[in-house]
Amino acid sequence: MRLSEAGWRRNAIALAGGLVSALVPSIRLSFLGPTTAGRLDDAAYAAELRDRSLFPPTSMTAPVTAILDLGGTQPTGAALRELVVPLGQGLLGGKYGNVKVVLVAPDDSVAELIRLLAREYRLPLFLARTSQPEDVAAAEPIGDLTQAEHETLNSLNAVGGISTVAGFAGATGLGATAANNRLTGLNRKGYVHRLPRGRRYGDIFVDPRSPVSDELIANAMHPEIPPARDALLRAGIVDDPYARTRIELHGEAGHRAAEILRRRGKVE
């Protein structure tokens, strides 16, 4: 489920010279702007900005996608390396909790350097041209990914950005084992969110580039809880699927139902 640009930006508030927009399961973070433009020319400052202002260590378990917009800055190579490499390594090590990062680099030379750093150090990062929702949704995964892993991530995005192993296997035609190996591999490398639900229902995997409604996440996380009546109506379901009203059958259908009940010992 895609959100409009208006929906993406609806709850924006000022923070650290940028924007923070509430989004489930993603939170859009855009810290670098006019207040810090031109200051990314010092490695020590880049390190302080990264660890204190942008990405302080956290135990947050809720899935967060941070969009770090480098537009309007002219970082030196040393400062960019100090910003990007420890950030990517911290993401891979779980230093920042369940966080994925999309770097926005409108400048081609900056984008090229980010790609080189991500590939050299195998950093689990995404790269976009702008911070517009459509560009973030199509952000390029960079770092240590095989062709099969690229295809798996694209397939997850194509099925709505959220799926269980069973659902992904059914949508792609893969076997259950292959689907599990692909999704867990992407999670291990830091490219998808994994939300645990227990063995009975199976964990949920979420493409961090795909905004997903909070209602969809809530329903997916608690499949044993029937959806609210208004949710059913919004989905076009006008009959109550939980009703226990007696159903009367006549003719051949009634005879068949009666025979089935007799065989099960329900009636004499």
Image: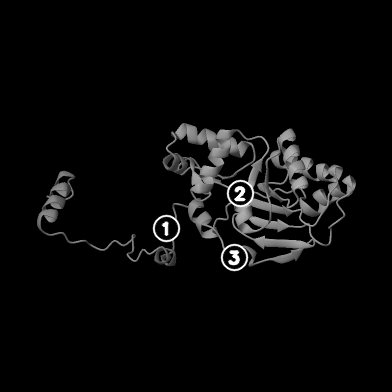
Give x and y (percent) for residue 157: 53, 47
Distance between mark 3 and mark 1 Cα atoms? 27 Å
Mark whose residue sits in front, 1 or 2: 2
Q: Residue at x 88, y 45 (%)?
A: 43
| Tag nearer the camera, 3 or 1 | 3
From the viewer's side, name the closer residue of 1 and 223: 1
29 displayed left or right of 239: right
CA gap between label 1 and label 2 equals 27 Å
Secondary-structure class at tag 1: loop
What residue did someone put label 1 on?
226
| Residue occupying image coordinates x 74% and y 47% | 108
Coordinates of residue 259 in the picture (x, y in percent): 13, 48
- For residue 7, the mark is 3
Q: Residue at x 83, y 52 (%)?
A: 74
Is residue 197 something that shows in the picture?
A: no
Q: Are marks 1 and 2 in contact (CB under 8 Å)?
A: no
- Crowd tier of the residue under label 1, counting other residues whose Cα lies within 10 Å: few below 14, some 14–19, many 20 or above: few
Work out whether residue 268 or residue 168 is closer to the camera in this orientation and state it: 168
The local secondary structure at tag 3 comes to helix
Answer above or below: position of 177 versus 246.
above
